[in-house]
Amino acid sequence: MPSDMVSRSFNSQPAIGAFMPTNRITPARAPSSIIIPRGRALFWEGDQQSQKIEIIEGVVRAVRLLPDGNRQVLAFYWPGDVVMPTRQSCQQFTAEAVTDCRVVRASVANVCQAGAPCGTHQVLEETLSLALTMSQRTCVARVAWLLLRIQPHLREDPKCPSALRLKLPRADIADHIGTSLETVCRTLAHFKAKKLIDLPNRKTIKYLDRDGLMRVASTRTQR
């Protein structure tokens, strides 16, 4: 975990006999942002997480490490999202920076307090919703569904006009929707051939036919 940046301030001492107000109110200092490098953990499963973490830039993933060495990507946090604090006894996931991230940490007095859902509760709600969604869709439909879901969070790539920066690695997409990396790559190539999307390179995407993607995303598994 990177240490918080330390800021220094210099307060000049008043001269003897100078006027000093007796009821000076010192304004609260706003928390400063810190940079989390890509691949670094913000906190680990089983940690006491006593801070609210607001994502200013970048993407963070909530990951559960499985006994067989594999992992499950449970949720993603995007700019504007806040990771709520969680007690050590119920901390069930690791938070990792998918990209270089800028975050603001703010300590809280009470963790897992009533009326303020903890971080684990946040991820549990996301995971339950994801499980219900994925169980009713084919693997191809899952990829289309995820592409549509993340589009509002993607920003334009300055080096590729009209393309968006696809910040999620293909392996993360596969782990999140419960399929293989090969299936994700093959499905993206299929969408490109059908002119639903374009992939100028591995890190950018163009949405060419949202209605077509929506039709694919609505495909249900056969009962």
Image: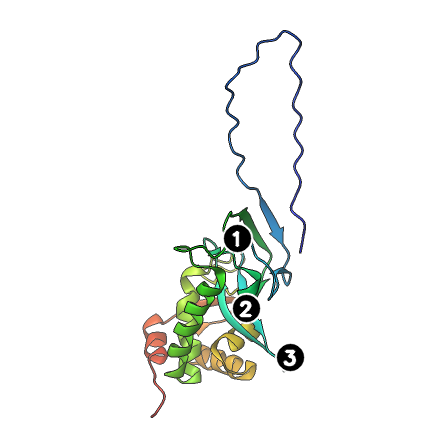
Is the residue under label 1 in contact with that under label 2 (CB below 8 Å)? no
Q: Quadrant of the N terminus?
A: bottom right
Could you tell me the amino acid type at mark 3? Gly
Question: Residue 107: percent from the left, percent from the top?
Answer: 54, 47
**Residue at the image point whose x is 41% and y is 56% from the top:** 114
| Number of marks in picture | 3
The CA distance from mark 3 to mark 1 is 27 Å
The CA distance from mark 2 to mark 1 is 17 Å
- Assess disc 2: are there few (<14), some (14-19) or many (≥20) residues with their C-alpha within 10 Å of its C-alpha: many
Question: Residue 117: percent from the left, percent from the top?
Answer: 43, 59
Q: Which residue is mark 2?
A: 92
The CA distance from mark 2 to mark 3 is 16 Å
**Looking at this view, is 222 or 212 the one in front?**
222
**Which element type, helix, strand or loop, lies under badge 3?**
loop
Could you tell me the amino acid type at mark 1? Ile
Residue 53: which disc? Answer: 1
Is 134 displayed left or right of 29 in the figure? left
Q: Which residue is mark 3?
A: 69
Q: How is the image coloured?
A: rainbow
221 over 17 or under it: above or below: below
